[in-house]
C-alpha cells in the first residue's frame, strides 16, 4: 500500500501568514489522485482539495493544492482563525485508499 | 444541504455484533456511493468499505472484509455497516462519507462526511 507521510506534525503560524503543509507518498500516486481534508474537533471532516489541485465547492481561494507523483503540498495563504485545524491527505490512485497521519495547524 | 448523520455507536463487549446506520438527506441518495471510514484513538484514518448507488457493488478493506458488511436501503436514505466479532482494535469513530462520482463511477474520495459515531469495544 502507499504510505503517506505528512510534515510537519504540528505547524504554528500566526493569523494572516502563510501555511505550507507537505504530504509525501512512498510511491507515485496515479493520476494525481490526492485529496486534502480539514478536521476540527467534534465536526465532520471537510473536503478541501481533490485531484491534487482542485478546490472543493465552497473552499476559499486562499487554499491551494499542488504537486504530483510523490510530493504534494497544501498552501493556505493569509490564514484566517477558522483555518486552524488538523489537515489530512488521502490518496485514491490505487485500490487501497490510504491517509496521512495529519498535520495540526495551530495558532502561533 | 447535504447531510450525513451516523448512529448506532456505543459501548459494546468483545465478540458481540453491532450495526451502524448512516442517514442521508439533501441530495438524491440513490445516485451516490457511500463509504465508511474510521479513526481509532491516537491513530490515523482508515477506509473501511463502500457501497455504490444501487447496493450491488461493495468493496472492503482487505483486513476487515471477513467481519464487516455494508448495505443500503435507498427507500430509507440509509446505509448500514454491520460489524461482527468486535475486537478491541475496532474501537474508533466511524464516519460515513459520500463519494462524488455518482452513478458514473466511484471516485474514492469523499466530498461530504458525517460527524461520526463512536464505537467503544470494552468488557
Image: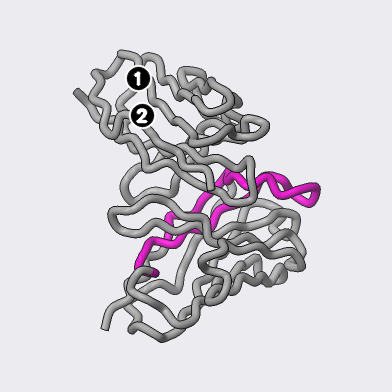
User: Would residue A67 be counted in the magenta stretch?
Assistant: no
Q: Earlier in the sequence, mark 2 or mark 1?
A: 1
Horizontally, is A39 left or right of B19 in the view?
Answer: left
Query: Which residue is at the front of the view, B106 or A23?
Result: A23
Q: Which mark is residue B18?
A: none
* Magenta segment boundaries in residue numbering: B90-116
Residue B20 in picture, x, y percent from top left: 50, 72
| Distance Cα–Cα, label 2 vs label 1 | 10 Å
Q: Is residue B90 above or below residue B109?
A: below
Q: Are marks 2 and 1 in contact (CB under 8 Å)?
A: yes
State the residue position of label 1: A19
Residue A42 in picture, x, y percent from top left: 33, 51
Instruction: Tell me what residue is drawn at x 38 percent, y 48 percent.
Output: A43
User: Would residue B99 be counted in the magenta stretch?
Assistant: yes
State the residue position of label 2: A83
Tally the numbered discs: 2
Instruction: Tell me what residue is drawn at x 35 percent, y 80 percent.
Output: B12
Specify the quadrant that holds the C terminus of chain B: bottom left
Horizontally, is A14 left or right of B19 in the view?
Answer: left
Query: Which residue is at the front of the view, A70 or B89?
Result: A70
Residue B85 lies in what quarter of the image?
bottom left
Magenta segment main secondary structure: loop
Amino acid at each position: 500500500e502507499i504510505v503517506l507521510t505528512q510534515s510537519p506534525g504540528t505547524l504554528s503560524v500566526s493569523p494572516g501568514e502563510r501555511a505550507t503543509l507537505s504530504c509525501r507518498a512512498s510511491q507515485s500516486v496515479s493520476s494525481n489522485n490526492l485529496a486534502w481534508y480539514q478536521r476540527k474537533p467534534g465536526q465532520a471532516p471537510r473536503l478541501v482539495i481533490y485531484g491534487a489541485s482542485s478546490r472543493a465547492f465552497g473552499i476559499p481561494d486562499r487554499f491551494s493544492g499542488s504537486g504530483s507523483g510523490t510530493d504534494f503540498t497544501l498552501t493556505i495563504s493569509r490564514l484566517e482563525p477558522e483555518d486552524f485545524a488538523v489537515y489530512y491527505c488521502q490518496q485514491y490512485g490505487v485500490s487501497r485508499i490510504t491517509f496521512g497521519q495529519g498535520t495540526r495547524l495551530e495558532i502561533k | 444541504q447535504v447531510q450525513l448523520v451516523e448512529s448506532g455507536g456505543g459501548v459494546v463487549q468483545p465478540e458481540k455484533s453491532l450495526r451502524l446506520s448512516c442517514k442521508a438527506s439533501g441530495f438524491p441518495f440513490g445516485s451516490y456511493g457511500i463509504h465508511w471510514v474510521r479513526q481509532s484513538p491516537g491513530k490515523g484514518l482508515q477506509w473501511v468499505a463502500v457501497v455504490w448507488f444501487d447496493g450491488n457493488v461493495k468493496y472492503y478493506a482487505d483486513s476487515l472484509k471477513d467481519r464487516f458488511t455494508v448495505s443500503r436501503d435507498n427507500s430509507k436514505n440509509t446505509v448500514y455497516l454491520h460489524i461482527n466479532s468486535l475486537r478491541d482494535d475496532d474501537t474508533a469513530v466511524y464516519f460515513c462519507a459520500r463519494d462524488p462520482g455518482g452513478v458514473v463511477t466511484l471516485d474514492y474520495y469523499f466530498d461530504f462526511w458525517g460527524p461520526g459515531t463512536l464505537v467503544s469495544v470494552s468488557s
